[in-house]
Structures are given as C-alpha cells and as structure tokens.
Image: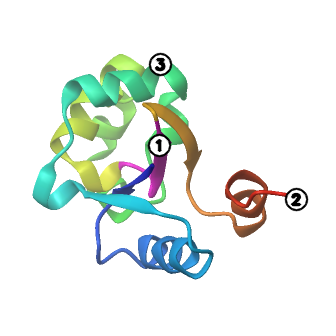
Amino acid sequence: MFIIYGIPNCDTIKKVRTWFESNRIPYQFHDYKKEGIGKAKLQTWLKQKDWSVLVNTKSTTWKNLGEKERALVNNAKSALPLMEQQTSVIKRPVIEKDDKIIAVGFNEQEYKNLFIKKP
C-alpha cells in the first residue's frame, strides 16, 4: 500500500488524495501535524533522495527562516533537524511504498506513469 505523507490542509495534498481516489488507488495518509515524523524515517528518506529534493525551499516555512538559518542548511546532515522540527518544510507529498520513496511532489503525468497499471 502507498503511504502519502503530508498535511491535510495543503492544496497539493488535497489534489494528490483526490487523484488517488479518482483513480481508485488505495493509500494511507500520514499526517505530519498529528503523527509527526521520526528521525529514522527522515534518515531513510535522505539516503534515497537528496536533501534539496525533500526540503521545499519555496515554502513559507523555509522563507520564514532567517537568512543565516537557511544558509546553514546545505546538506543532509543539516537538513535533518530542520525537517524533524518543522515538518512543513518537507516538500509535499512524499509517497512511499515498502519504505521506498516513489514520488516527491505532484506531477500528474508522472503519477500516471508510476501508479496506473498498463494493460
């Protein structure tokens, strides 16, 4: 089963969940705000994807960091505590299956190629 990680009031997450439901693809939703995200999970992700893919530098959370704070986040090791403490900085969604990241962010064409079985 796919796990969609994000926050429920995010417009992108709403689109993704609607897309999954309209394509009858079963999934679980992991709400960062209610369930948090553990350091071990983030470390697993950072081994699979570069920190710059997982940290949303266009997010309000990122922009609200001070310039010095942003400058300090320049590798996986420095991104980890930020992602753990401020989950809103993680690009949404992260979609996972069997502990492997399948997709980060939303791209409908990519989703069709990844998630819809071809005959």
Residue for point 58% across, 82% down: 22
Where 101 falls versus 25 (above or below)? above
Q: Closer to the camera: disc 3 or disc 1?
A: 1
Where is residue 7? Give x, y as percent. 29, 65
Q: Residues within 10 Å of mark 3 (few under 14, many from 20)?
A: few
Q: Amino acid at mark 2?
A: Pro
Cα distance in 3D space between marks 3 and 2: 33 Å
Q: Which residue is mark 3?
A: 47
Seen from the viewer's position, the closer of residues 60 and 108 is 108
Q: Quadrant of residue 109?
A: bottom right
The residue tagged with tag 2: helix, strand or loop?
loop
Q: Which residue is mark 2?
A: 119
Residue for point 68% across, 63% down: 107
Where is residue 111? Give x, y as percent. 69, 60
Q: Residues within 10 Å of mark 2 (few under 14, many from 20)?
A: few
Mark 3 or mark 1: name the one nearer the start of the chain. 3
Residue range (magenta): 90-97
Q: Are marks 3 and 1 in contact (CB under 8 Å)?
A: no
Q: Quadrant of residue 4?
A: bottom left
Residue for point 54% across, 71% down: 20
Q: Amino acid at mark 1?
A: Glu
Mark 3 or mark 2: name the one nearer the start of the chain. 3
Q: Closer to the camera: disc 3 or disc 2?
A: 2
Q: Quadrant of residue 43?
A: top left
The residue tagged with tag 1: helix, strand or loop?
strand
**Tag of residue 96:** 1
Horizontal side of residue 73 vs 54, given as left or right: left
Cα distance in 3D space between marks 3 and 1: 14 Å
Cα distance in 3D space between marks 2 and 1: 23 Å
